[in-house]
Every structure is written in C-alpha cells, then in structure tokens.
Amino acid sequence: MADAAGQGQGLESLSAEERRFPPPPGLAEHANVTEATFEAAAADDVAFWAEQARRLSWETEPTQTLDWSDAPFARWFADGRLNAAYNCLDRHVEAGLGERVAFHFEGEPGDTRTITYAELTAQVCQAANALVELGVKAGDRVAIYMPMIPEAAVAMLACARIGAPHTVVFGGFSSDALATRILDCGVEVVITADGGYRKGKASALKPAVDEALERCPEVRSVLVVRRTEQETAMTEGRDVWWHDLVDRQPTEHAYEAFEAEHPLYIMYTSGSTGQPKGIFHTTGGYLTGVAYTHWATFDLKPETDVFWTAADIGWVTGHSYLVYGPLANGTTSVMYEGTPDTPHQGRWWDVVDKYGVTILYCAPTAIRTFMKWGAEIPAKADLSSLRLLGSVGEPINPEAYVWYREHIGHDRTPVVDTWWQTETGMHMISPMPGVAEGKPGAAMRAVPGVSVKVVNDEGQPVSDDAAGYLVIDRPWPAMLRGIWGDQQRYVDTYWSRFPGVYFAGDGAKLDADGDIWLLGRVDDVMNVSGHRMSTTEIESSLVSHPKVAEAAVVGASDETTGQAIVAFVILRSEAGDGGPDVVDELRRHVAKDIGAIARPRQIMVVDELPKTRSGKIMRRLLRDVAENRELGDVTTLTDSTVMDLIKGNLATTS
Ligand code: WT7
C-alpha cells in the first residue's frame, strides 16, 4: 500500500486533522437526508432504491428492482420503461414549471442566455427531429464534441430522447482521441461547433473533427453549431449547420419510452493500460441514482436553489450533475463556458453574485488556484447567496477545504467532498450536509443505499487508521453496465482483484469514527486537475515519437493540479542528444496526440530507467526523483547504479 499513501496525502498529516464543522442548524432542521434515511437504506437497500426510482416518471412502472443473478452484470428496474429526456424536460413543463429557468448560460465573452424548461424542451424536440432527419435511430451512437454552450446539453438530451447513446468527447482532446472514440463505438453522426471561447480567444474545434474523420469513413453526417463565427470549412454532403437544420424543425417531438436498461451514454476514461475504456451507462438506474444523489448530497431545494457545477460537459461530472441529475430534479443551473481568469481572476465570483448561486460544485484544483491568487479576489464579490459548497475529482487537502469554507463560504456553508468515478455514475461517498460533522479532508461515509469497505491485500476489512483498498460490496443503480465492446475487460478490471466486490482502484482508510479518507489511486492512473490520465497512454504517445526509444511517466505531487505529469525518456541513438528543443518538441507531441491536459509538466532525458529483475519500471523511484525526495528502497533493481546515473544525468541537463 506504499503507493496509495505516496500518491495521496500523507497519512500522518491526515490523522492530525482535528477541525470539525457541524451542520448549520437551519440546514439540519430542514435537511433532505437525516440519520433515519441511513437506517432505512441499510435495512433494505433494494427497497430503498425502488422507492427512489419513484422520483422519475415511468411510462411503465417497474415491478422488478435489482436483478444480480448474472453478476457482475446488473439489471435495475428491468421491466420498467421510461424516456430520460421526458424526465428531464416535458414532465416539469406539464407540472406547470415551464417558466422556471433550466440554465443561466454565461459565455466567456460575456454573452448570456436564459433558458426556461419550456424553451429547453422545445429546443431538444427540434434537435431530436433533426437527428431523425439525419437518419439516427434508437441504439445508434452519436459523438458530441462541443464547447460549454447550451447546445451541448441540448444535443445530449436530443440523443437521449430518441434512444441514441451519446458519447461526449471533451473539447480539449485531440483529433486523434476523438477518432479513437468514434471508431471504438462505431459512431456515424457527430455533433460539434465551429469553436468555443477560451482564455479570451475563439478557439476552433471543427478542424479537429475534419482531421479525425479522415480516419473515420463511417461518419456520414456532422452537425455544426455556429458559436464563434470563425471561418469554417464545410464538407459538401456531410456537414450541415445546426441553424440550417435544427431551427426549421417542429418544436414538438413524440418521444418513445425505452427499457430501463437501454444504453444512455458511453464515456471514455483512462485505465491503467493505453486504450481508453468506453464506460457505458443505462437509463433507469442511472437517472434514479443521479436524481437521488443530486437531491441528497446537495440538500437540494429545487424551488429556491441556483446550482452551479463548474465542470465541463466532457466529463462525467458534467453528465451527472450539470445535465441529468439537476434537470431530472427540475433545478435551475448555471452553465459557464470559459476559464476562471477571463477577463480577470474574479470571474467565477461575479458569476455567483450575478445569478445568486446557492450551491457551487467544483474541483480542488480550482480551489487551490484561487488560494494562490489570493482571498482578496473573492472578497470583492457578494457571495452571500452561497449556502453549500461541493468538491469533486480528487482528494481535497484539509487546507484547501478550510480555505474554501472560509473565503468562499464565509464559514457558514458546509463543504461536501464527493467521491465517485465515471464508472459509478453517481456520488458514492460524501458527507450528507444535514447530518455529518464535516472533517476537512474526509469524504466521510457512503451515501444512503451504497455500501463500501476498506480491505487489505487479502480482501479482509482493515482496522481503524490502516490504509487499504476501497471496494464497493453491493450493486448500485447508476453503476456502469460494462465496457463498450469488451465485457471481459470489465470483469477483469473491476471484479477480479477481490472476488464478488467492485475494485475502485483507490486507496483509503477508515478513522475511529468509521469515516473514510481517500488516499489516491493505487494503480498506474494519475489524477491531474481532477482528470484521470493513464501513465501508459502518455508513455505510448512518447514512444510513438521517432526520437524516443523508451519512456516512463509518473504522477508527481503538484501544489495546484494535485498530480503533475513527469516523464523520463531515453532517446534513440540516431537522435543523438535530440537537439536543444527536444523537450519542447516532445511536450508538443503529447499535447497534439492526446490533448493539452496530457502535456507533461516536465520531461527528463535519461540514459537508463530503473527496472526490476522482471523488467517492470519502478515508478516509485522515479516519483522520488520527480518530487526531489530521498530515494526509497532500491534493492529490487536489476542494477542499483541506474538511479545514480539518472540523478547524475539530471544534474547535468537541468
Ligand atoms: C477517480 C475517478 C468523480 C468525477 C470526476 C472524476 C478520484 C474522485 C474524489 C474525491 C478523492 C477522488 C479517485 C477516483 N476522485 N473524487 N472526492 N476524493 N479522490 O472522475 O475521471 O472517473 O476519476 O478520481 O481516484 O477513482 P474520474
């Protein structure tokens, strides 16, 4: 378990954390979740989830809840039928909430759009009709490669409405990453935009689609939203403008109800091997899970809250807590297009002030960035509307938690640290704000209806304060149903390390109160700014460069991004010393290959890599070097002088 503790926060510093923040009395009194909720859920989790499924409107009510007979392939609410878009849209309009705002959209250049539930419903119907005109049928996969604009949500919901699973590819990913995903799940229609705004500039997206499609002959249509009005090449017969096709469609669309287990979407995520995994989610269980947790974790009051998930639609956080959970609950949300420091470092706080945001949900990396910029920046805005703060994506260190609570929440707001994954679809571990006495740095305990354990190498529960592996020992409704096209990999990755339980890949410990502290990944997966990156994927990218013979990548701790990508490369002999710009050249190569978020912070050119006798690269030692630490145990190295060589190398190259 050395790795788990090494990658996350130090165990000792966590045990020393004694600050406690009880729920504010007003919140506790009217809390959505109480201790009684936990008791009811623990007494019969299946009955609990059956009850939560009634938050949704079913065309055919399910009579079955969980079918686990073919474990680990779960079926939830299998004989029920429903439409996800209807649940997020029309039913609210039918209930008289058509004038409620669904999204306050704030574009980076300062343009805004207020979209009510009635308007969003009409737009989704138009987009659904357009997809039908393009020949998209239930079951067909549609790729969405978009900036953070309302049409991204409209596109997702239009796909859901006609039963076409979407796969949203983060707009920051490269054309190559897009092509790989399109090919992996057999996409024939892509929805994109000319570009989006980032850091004060229009940044193009469509050229990356064109490049990707050179490798994807099966794609027959590309629907393009005009956002930036950049010069955009359109391929005759394949590409069509959104405003030409969608705007002329009827604003009504008769939806069809699908089986609860009908696939809703595929979201690719990095694993410990190079090939990204297409995690797929289905309809009834997923929507039940996200609607429930969005309501429970954030103590949501849909009549009065203004909810802001500051995450991109290209990640699961955007799917579950910007689109499906909030809309299923009839929430008013904020959607912001751009970066936090455009045009100035107080942009987020202006957004909170302007829309009266009551609940803010973001990643620790953003919080640490704001800490660096200084507390005087948020102090200039009126943040008194905030009543609850959320954190997601990586362990939140106690200092960042306390700063967030103090300088953003003015010491009134609970902070909920939510642990979950692309695979889990919904929050799994989080304090419930009306019940928990918050501990900075702890994700606390499993949400009602969820069961997790911390186990040792043998799969036995660990004792208090000992580090172990986080496992989930009961199925849950929003769980992944598998890896698209590779169910064996699903079984191998998640269900084989410990028979019968889900292996999350995270280290964790329990404290004496039974509360859970997350310690970081235990596999070759890094967490950079709350985004999962695979060391192998970046290594393969480096090795694909003609000058590189071998590469090893590690995640080194970084004050702002949590972990940062550090690469060690051995150059091919033909490449000589690689030339003065070799490091820049390689960093650019990875950014082009995978996306800017994968660009290594640092690349070190070395002559050798430390390997065990069985040939496995000892990343632990490289991490020591990357973090400027004394080297750990080197006795299993084939050649213990390698590390001296590497350190000697660095002394001369840096
Ligand atoms: C991995 C999942 C959950 C949506 C965003 C990331 C890490 C996530 C926390 C947290 C500690 C966390 C884990 C997990 N992680 N939330 N609150 N505390 N670690 O989704 O890309 O699927 O990554 O992110 O290591 O396994 P993802």
Image: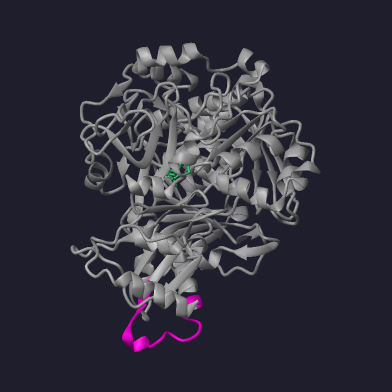
Is 147 displayed left or right of 507 in the figure? right
User: Total of numbered circles in the picture?
Assistant: 0
Quadrant including the N terminus: top left
- In the image, residue 42 lies at what x, y percent? 38, 16
Whether residue 299 is visible, yes or no, is: yes
One can see residue 139 in this view: no
Ligand 1 falls in which quarter?
A: top left
Q: Above or below — where is 282 with respect to 132?
A: above
Q: Is 177 rendered above or below residue 35?
A: below
Looking at the rendering, the stretch of residues picked out in magenta corresponds to 569-584
Which residue is drawn at the image coordinates 73% and 55% (left, top)? 109
In the figure, residue 285 lies in which quadrant? top left
Q: Is residue 17 left or right of residue 116?
A: left
User: Residue 237: horizontal and vertical position, in percent?
Assistant: 49, 64
Residue placed most toward the observer, 288 or 518: 518
The correct choice, above or below, for 504 with respect to 226 in the image is above
Q: Is residue 572 magenta?
A: yes
Residue located at (72% from left, 49% from top): 374
Residue 265 percent coordinates (x, y)? 41, 42
State the residue in front, 597 or 569. 569
